[in-house]
Image: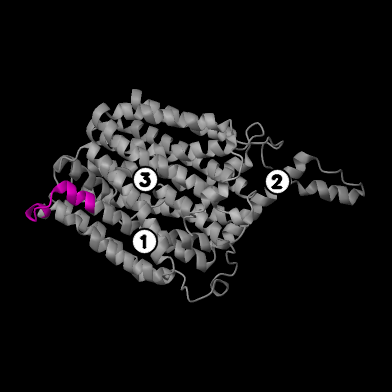
Amino acid sequence: MLIQTDWLKNLRGRSFDLELGAIAIIYFVQGAMAISQLAVSFFLKDDLGLSPAEVASMVGITMLPWTVKPLYGLISDGFPVFGYRRRPYLLLSSFLGVFAWASMSIWVTTPFWAIAMIATGSLSLAFSDAITDALIVQRARLEPEGDAGSLQSFSWIASSVGAIMSAYLSGYLLEHFGAKFVFEITAILPLLVGISAFAIADYPMSAVFITAPDPSIANNSAHSGDQPKPSTPNSSRNSQAWMSLKFNFIQLKQAFTNKAIWMPAAFLFVWQATPSADTAFFYFTTNELKFNPEFLGTIKFFASWAGLLGVWLFQRFFKGVPTRKIFFWTTIISTALGLTSLLLVTHVNRSLSIDDRWFSLGDNLILTIAGRIAFMPVLVLAARLCPEGIEATLFALLMSVLNISALCSFQLGAGLTHLLGVTESNFDNLWILVLIANISSLLPLPFLKWLPDEKITNTEEISKPSVLPESAIASLAIEAVEAMEIEPLESRESDRPEAILQENI
């Protein structure tokens, strides 16, 4: 199963330890950080007076830390701080998060510093997410084979609880206390990560930096006839770490030169890089339709549940559908459903006696379910493409490709918003922007052949196929679903990937 319903049974009987509780708290915080989303949106719009095009462009900048997430894992693995690989980086990410959001609540009053602090908060969240993923991997190795994936499911539940709890609160607190107060609450959450860092098992390593072993030493010893000195724990660990890192880079290079991997990756990039009208639509709903923060928070709350329903529907009814087929039909259906936004933009819904709020709520729920069903096969496909031994790193790189494409999507949307003259008060051409954004989502369809034909076996298609068990594939997919739970600026299109700022704004 993609979501393993027996995760609690697998965890039952284990003695609860501080590290497991710390991991749960960290994942809960990652979900709860979504509480700042609406506050950021309204702060940029109202307090700083930025236009839709400016906000869309700046949102792309704040996504940059998520595009290099695999780098954080490499830094943590290869460059311990005082011999520790996890705890110092969790403390650092905690400090960055507290500093960023406290700054937003106290002294940030310009667009430059606002984007700088939001990006810093994004870096904090991405870094802590990478470290916590590593902790999950470490603990998962100790699990019996039959229990594989239970910890990942446990972390997913913790994050989902945080995301759902923060969804409604984000609107309620913003409505009654203002953006600055929400930023203060957000600044408290990373403190929990810092406190939890002291409860994780992080054993010191002697090697502080990874250095390549010097082959000249071995050569000199061999020529001189001297017996080589027994390797010290430091040099042995250095050599093993260096060789492991080198091997992973070689494997990644081979993977991305494999047509069976880079062609699907290219398709995923094209699929996510189409223009986005999200930011302009957010301005329309708040300035034209007068949706208040509390109502938008209500939409987010129900959309969170709708996303979970979409995952369940995929698992229950669509898991066995070939990838190309489900991509084709979900793209067609999502585009058709997305065009219903034109009814709201042109106020046709009013002539049909449908209230703006009810129409928007229903439209969001349907689009969220359809978008989640459409995105699930991407995650499973990405996990199955990953060769054994580098599956986590390659999967993270594939998610980074999606994040980069989402960045392109926002930048293209910003350019179109500016060209069409859509501003905070002029929405005459918004229908054109919405039409272009939805129709352009059909552009990737001619490239469906880049996806693997599921009639071909893995051994025929991929020279070094993944031998991941179903539970491992599920775990990677669940992780990415967790990362998609929250989207910025009231995204209404099909699900975007791991950041779409993830929980960072």
Answer whether residue 376 is magenta in the image: no
Q: Nearer the viewer, residue 8 or 92?
A: 8
The residue that appears at 41% across and 39% down in the rendered structure is 162
Quick one: label 2, few (<14), some, or many (20+) residues within 10 Å? some
Q: Which mark is residue 374?
A: 1
Whether label 1 touches label 3, CB < 8 Å:
no
Q: Which residue type does callout 1 highlight?
A: Ala
Q: On residue 212, which mark appears?
A: 2
Q: Is residue 426 left or right of residue 258?
A: left
| Category of crowding for the residue at label 3, using alpha-carbon neighbours closer than 10 angstroms: few (below 14), some (14–19), many (at least 20) | many
Eye-nearest disc, 2 or 1: 1
- Extent of the magenta region: 349-362
Estimate the x, y position of residue 5 in percent, counting from the top left: 48, 54
Residue picked out by circle 3: 486
Seen at 41% across and 70% down, the residue is 321
Real-space Cα separation, disc 2 to disc 1, in angstroms? 44 Å
Classify 78 as above or below 265: above
Q: For residue 460, which quarter of the picture?
A: bottom right
Which secondary structure lies at badge 2? loop
Q: Which circle's residue, 3 or 2, is located before the other in the chain?
A: 2
> Can residue 40 be seen in this snapshot?
no
- 422 relative position to 88: left or right: left
Kind of residue at badge 2: Ala
- What's the residue type where badge 3 is placed? Ile
